[in-house]
């Protein structure tokens, strides 16, 4: 039996994950996760199903969200915990964020077509069956059609920033995403800091984000090496930010990452939940 743990970063079929919310909750139960957060991109669609599954399996489900933002050329992802997922301002803004995906995705498809890959946006929509369509869905179509053998190859060759078919999406700045989450009663947390870590400036960046309302940093993450976990723990201590963690499970597009355990080394301690609840006014 695995040690009890949290997993505060999970994607489902309601955005770019490949398993439905109830299946993700069931996997969390198997991994001895005692509390989890569903953090789909730009949508709260999976939360009701996850809450119901959580009641059935006796596992705590935290309503969450992940919002992409851009700051000085960097893509920062902001997680929100304990959001009021019925908040009309939140729902309206998320609808607009999802709409920018429909501006961008056909442009990516056009680039792929120019490169000689026969894919259509209809095929992507058919596979995705959600309004929150992302590059991982496009990657899956490219795999199905045999153009690439993995999502990693799809991103490396075509979809990643700087790759052949990359098109940027219009994104809010982090202050807007943070304020939106706060406005819905949620706790905003910087996701996977390692993605934007260029060797220095992380403390300054987090200090700036904290001034705009950031409450925490995702210290524990599937791909973090022990020294990275320590580094971000120190940033959190220095700036008095909450410590969180999660796997960023997506299913088939990140086949090496499992719910609760990431690549096997992830352990998000249960003791991190109380401070997060306190920050949300739930303790
Ligand atoms: P989008 O929301 O369309 O901008 O797509 C971004 C999502 O793609 C991220 O949230 C990740 O889940 C996923 N992603 C980014 N890079 C990779 C990669 N190399 N392999 C698989 N998935 C990736
Ligand atoms: Zn994703
Ligand atoms: Fe992310
Ligand atoms: Fe994520």
Image (cartoon, rainbow, N blue to C red):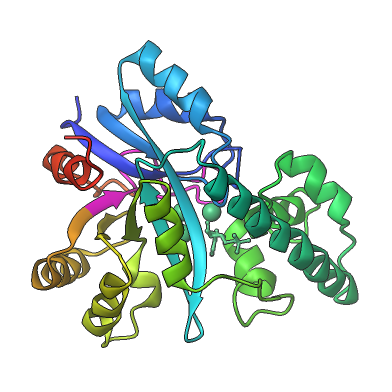
The residue drawn where x is 50% and y is 58% is 67
Answer above or below: position of 223 versus 37.
below
Q: Nearer the viewer, residue 36 or 91?
A: 91
Quarter holding residue 98: bottom right
Q: Is residue 133 left or right of residue 183?
A: right
Residue 152 occupies which quadrant of the picture? bottom right
Look at 77% across and 59% down and name the residue there. 102
| Image point (20%, 30%), residue name | 2
Compared across the picture, whether 131 is left or right of 248 comes to: right
Image coordinates for residue 182, horizontal then vertical, percent: 37, 54
x and y, in percent, of residue 236 in the image: 15, 66
The residue at 81%/52% (across/down) is 145
In the picture, which quadrant includes the N terminus?
A: top left
Left or right: residue 67 versus residue 129 is left
Task: Report whether residue 74 is seen.
Answer: yes
Q: Is residue 149 visible?
A: no
Question: What type of secondary structure mainly makes up the magenta span?
Answer: loop
Provide residue 120's location: percent of width, then percent of height: 88, 56
Q: Nearer the viewer, residue 282 or 117?
A: 282
Residue 14 place in picture, x, y as percent: 61, 38
- Would you say residue 258 sits in the magenta stretch? yes
Q: How many marks?
A: 0
Residue 114 falls in image quadrant: bottom right
What range of the chain is rendered magenta? 244-262
The C terminus lies in which quarter of the figure? top left
């Amino acid at each position: 039996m695995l040690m009890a743990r949290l997993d505060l970063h999970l994607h489902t079929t309601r955005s770019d994950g490949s398993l439905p919310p109830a299946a993700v909750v069931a996997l969390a139960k198997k991994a001895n996760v005692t509390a989890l957060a569903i953090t789909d991109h730009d949508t709260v669609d999976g939360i009701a199903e996850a809450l119901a599954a959580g009641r059935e399996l006796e596992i705590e489900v935290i309503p969450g969200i992940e919002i992409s933002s851009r700051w000085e050329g960097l893509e920062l992802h902001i997680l929100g915990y304990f959001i009021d997922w019925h908040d009309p301002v939140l729902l309206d803004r998320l609808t607009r964020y999802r709409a920018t995906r429909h501006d961008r995705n056909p442009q990516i498809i056009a680039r792929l077509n120019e490169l000689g890959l026969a894919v259509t946006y209809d095929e992507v929509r058919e596979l995705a069956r959600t309004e929150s369509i992302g590059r991982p869905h496009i990657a899956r179509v490219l795999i199905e059609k045999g153009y690439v053998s993995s999502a990693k190859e799809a991103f490396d060759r075509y979809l990643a920033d700087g790759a052949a078919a990359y098109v940027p999406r219009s994104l809010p700045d982090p202050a807007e995403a943070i304020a939106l989450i706060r406005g819905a009663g949620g706790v905003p947390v910087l996701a996977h800091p390692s993605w934007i870590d260029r060797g220095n400036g992380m403390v300054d960046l987090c200090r700036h984000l904290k001034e705009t309302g950031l409450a925490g940093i995702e210290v524990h993450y599937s791909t973090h090496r022990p020294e990275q976990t320590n580094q971000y723990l120190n940033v959190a201590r220095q700036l008095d930010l909450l410590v969180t963690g999660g796997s960023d499970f997506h299913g088939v597009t990140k086949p090496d990452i499992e719910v609760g355990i990431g690549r096997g080394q992830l352990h998000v301690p249960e003791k991190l939940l109380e401070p997060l609840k306190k920050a949300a006014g739930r303790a």
